[in-house]
Image (cartoon, helix red, strand yellow):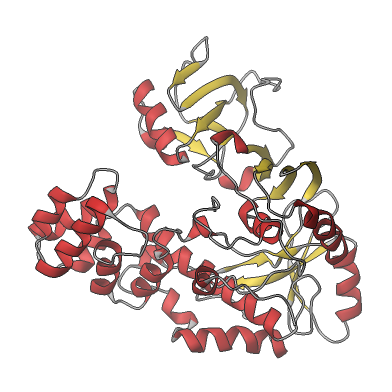
Amino acid sequence: MPKKSDLELDRLLGLEYYGLEGDGTGGYIRRQVEDFIVNEVSIDGLTAGPSCDYPSSEEGYWWFVMEKRGIDTVTALIILSKHWGLRRNTLSAAGLKDSKAITYQFVSVLGDFTPPKERVDLGRVSAYCFFKRPFYLKPGLLYGNRFKIRVRDASKPGNLGPLIEELRLVRGVPNYYGYQRFGTIRPNTHLIGKYIIQGRYREAVEELVQRVYPREYGRVAEARRYVAETGDYAGAAEMLPSSLRHEKHVVRYLANRPGDYYGALRSLPLYIRRLFVGAYQAYLFNKILSRRIKHGLSYFYPHVGDFIGIYPEGSHEPKGLIMVTESLLEKSRKLVEEGRAALMLPIVGYRINLGHGEPGRVAREVLAEEGVDLGDFRVKGMPEASSTGTYRRAALVPEDFSVDVRPPDYSLEFKLRKGMYATVLLREFIKPTDLIEQGF
């Protein structure tokens, strides 16, 4: 039987099993912002960083490297756009990077722009290495990210060697969506998403604004309790800090339009509404992946009824999906073994095929337990938040993996494809007992 997590948060978010059965090292991440460094890698192999050795074309769009420390990508882009007097949507990034880290990523500028002659430093965000490329930066142009992470004060650093050997043998770990997709202090983005697709708008608002989680204290917890007990949204708007801009926006809306929970949600930015629905899809993916492991199905090799994505030589994206039949099983597994294909699991949406045989049965079992079906993701009351669904690799396989052990600390360097979470891999090595205390 695979190793099961004892953590309540893992159970709540669907990360129920480990891929590596060995005991963990213990330890802490993100003790200092320098302990977690992320360099974005573009689909054509450019790595974002301070070296500035990028080829520049004569025509096209301006690109630059954005370095940020301890803030999220959206906030960093807002700071830069305000500094240059640009509309926020003028700046485009290929992905969201960790906020509790030093990160380097590419940003492109749409429209007329005169780049500064020198590096721009605005506190926790900087911009430099201005160069031109013939195309605009979009999320699909990201290959992945390179990580350099220091784990401090590992209680059992000697466990690292056996875990690395186990990783080599099993080829990878379950490619769960990580904690930051849902939140750790308030792990509820997926719950709000579920309420939205089910048309339960009041419950979505109450989950967003009113519910107090065990690790919430002080002014924020007080404001949430206050509005839950009194229904005084105007008063809550004064109590909530400006950092909770989405909650503050919702309570202000309801203060002016009492009872219009649907309108309050729809007044949020579109990307936030899609984020909620996407978080619920991520939760379902985690649940399906965990249920496969529970039923003894591989997360690396396909079974009859599964889908595999085909990766032609030199391609970073699958160029087609094939359902695995009995006659194709042996060939499919060989393609996966050779790295020319990968097992893909469904991110549930209204057009998705859940598969057949045992894999399909497992996926349908999870949806039945959740009380949802594929049609729910065609969100009738909020069609702009609908999702057709897609597929995602089932296994997280780190590339260019290396380790430097200096007890009681150790450092890991590796590269992951886009959409894969470094904390999911770190979880396998550390086997944390207190996620928040240990930096997850």
In the foreground, 134 or 389: 389
Q: Quadrant of residue 357?
A: bottom right
Residue 403 horizontal/vertical position (percent):
80, 44
Is 385 on the left or on the right of 333, as rendered?
Answer: left
Q: From this view, report whether residue 67 is shown above or below residue 177.
A: above
* Residue 355 can be seen in this image: no
Q: Quadrant of residue 14?
A: bottom right
* Residue 394 can be seen in this image: yes
Residue 146 horizontal/vertical position (percent):
69, 41
Is 169 on the left or on the right of 137, as rendered?
Answer: right
Q: From this view, report whether residue 348 is shown above or below residue 415.
A: below
Q: From this view, report whether residue 298 is shown above or below residue 27.
A: below
In the foreground, 332 or 105: 105
Is 72 on the left or on the right of 356, as rendered?
Answer: left
In the foreground, 407 or 181: 407
In the foreground, 296 or 342: 296
Residue 232 horizontal/vertical position (percent):
9, 62
Q: Residue at x 74, y 37 (%)?
A: 45
Is 237 on the left or on the right of 330, as rendered?
Answer: left
Q: How many marks?
A: 0
